[in-house]
Image: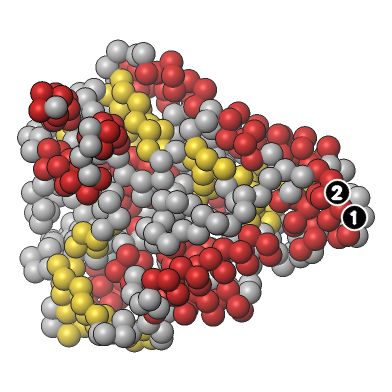
Amino acid sequence: MKDQLDRIIAATRKGAMSRREFLGRTTAMGISAGLAVALYGKVANAQEAKKGGVIRAGVYGGESTNSLDPALAASPVPVITCSTWGEMLCDVTPEGGLAMRIAEEATSSPDAKEWTFKIRQGVEFHNGKTVTAEDVVATLKRHTDEKAQSGALGIVQGIADMKAEGDKLVLTLSSANSDLPYLLADYHLAIQPNGGIDNPAEGIGAGPYKVEAFEPGVRTVFTKHANYFDSEVGHADQVEILVINDNTARTAALQSGQVHMINRVDPKISELLKGTEAVTIKQTAGRGHFVFIMHCDKAPFDNNDLRMALKLSIKRQEMVDKILGGLGSMGNDFPINASYPLFDDTIPQREYDAAQAEEFYKKSGHDGSPIILRSAPGAFPGAVDAANLFAASANAAGIPLQVKLEPDDGYWTNVWNVEPFCASYWGGRAVQDQMYTTAYLSTADWNDTKFKNQEFDDLLVAARGELDEAKKKADYSRMANILRDEGGLILPMFNDFVEGVRTDIGGWFDDPNGELMNGRALSRCWLG
């Protein structure tokens, strides 16, 4: 057993074994899950990071309309860009714990209504100014302004008062929230000088890399922030994001060595890539999900019978098999799966039922005119094929669903959150409260289904301050059922993060919080 464990450790230190593989093999040997996680941490951290060089990522999900304003980050390239130049108060670890960043300590009152964050001393912005508690207050306040169109609006709206007291940030909440530090790890909340009020798209933050060149929809070039506070982050001299939305071109760039890593490996070719010399495939199950979203406040989707008809007319397992190539799992029309704490696995799985779908459709009184579902190749990998599969199964149930193809460029500006029925995706969030607050709270700016339900909102607030886990789980279960049965979300599948990485990249670890190590791959990896 010792020899076997030594071989596993040696392979991990060389970067030849992922975190997932390490945990799977060690637990199979009889090592407890907790001990395996701790052992992996020690082994991974023992790898000696090499400094210097240029690391390039070929990333799907960039457009000519992209901005450096973190409030507006909605697709992979802006998210990863923000995570490279930006730094938040805290971060969420791959194991679901909390890592302190600009804040070095977080404490709360016993009722979780007042939180105090001690701001780390000596953290420097890219412009040479020192990060202060006042900068943090200004950042959070900017995101409370609806004119900022921030994806974090639903999170910061719950803060009744915020103030700086020396090196401390003091937040008073309108209602208790035991998960607040996890919410403040949201990538939109990158701390900016004076909150970014003067120029939110300037791209100046306190992260490991500073922006040198920004060409929306083409590339972003970063150089190392010489005075970054954490010597264990930011190993390359320069990193670069190349926007490569075409699957074939992105794969070719990885194979040729033009880039060192890519996201969104097409499931259809992942097996072929596994046999490519100098390339490894990283597969991580997490919270990401591919969806079709209906606006509950716009006809004909303001009719819940019609929404239910559509939910029952989709073949979920077929999509997991054909669109994801089996690299994922079925969804159940609410955005939470077993990756989240307090997930309720007793909620019945919704299945395709043509007869019941037709019954709900007739009950809706719809006039029989075409129901338009908008999709684009860039909505998610296989989105157009998924939409066509959906239309076929809905048509078989007597529902006149038609697919309209939209261009990739501008999709996240002109279609998502604008048109009443479209394909989309979510990367998931660290905790249930954050996912629900960001996308399903009535007042959230990114409530992309326009779902408004007072009972749901009240339960969300109650669950935030509930310290009894059984009661908190019951609240989340009820919320899941409300959203599943009344919301505008059709969630057929949770996707694994499938990425390609060159073998000369060291420091990679699996992170279920988001693709490309939750956006941190460029700053945490090194050239081996």
- Label 2 secondary element: helix
- From this view, report whether residue 526 is shown above or below residue 330: above
Q: Position of residue 318 (x, y in %)?
A: 64, 33
Report the quarter where the N terminus lies: top left
- Label 2 Cα neighbours within 10 Å, binned few <14 / some 14-19 / many ≥20: many
User: Which residue lies at the image location 57% right of the left edge and 35% below the top edge?
Assistant: 320
Q: Is residue 177 visible?
A: no
Q: Quadrant of residue 285?
A: top left
- Label 1 Cα neighbours within 10 Å, binned few <14 / some 14-19 / many ≥20: some
User: Which residue lies at the image location 18% right of the left edge and 50% below the top edge?
Assistant: 208
- Residue type at numbered disc 2: Glu
Q: 310 or 342, which lies in front?
A: 342
Q: Residue tagged by mark 1?
A: 362
Q: 44 or 39, which lies in front?
A: 39
Q: Is residue 275 visible?
A: yes
Q: Residue tagged by mark 2?
A: 358
User: Which residue lies at the image location 35% right of the left edge and 77% below the top edge?
Assistant: 467
Q: Quadrant of residue 283?
A: top left
Q: Position of residue 201 (x, y in %)?
A: 36, 58
Q: Quadrant of residue 109?
A: bottom left
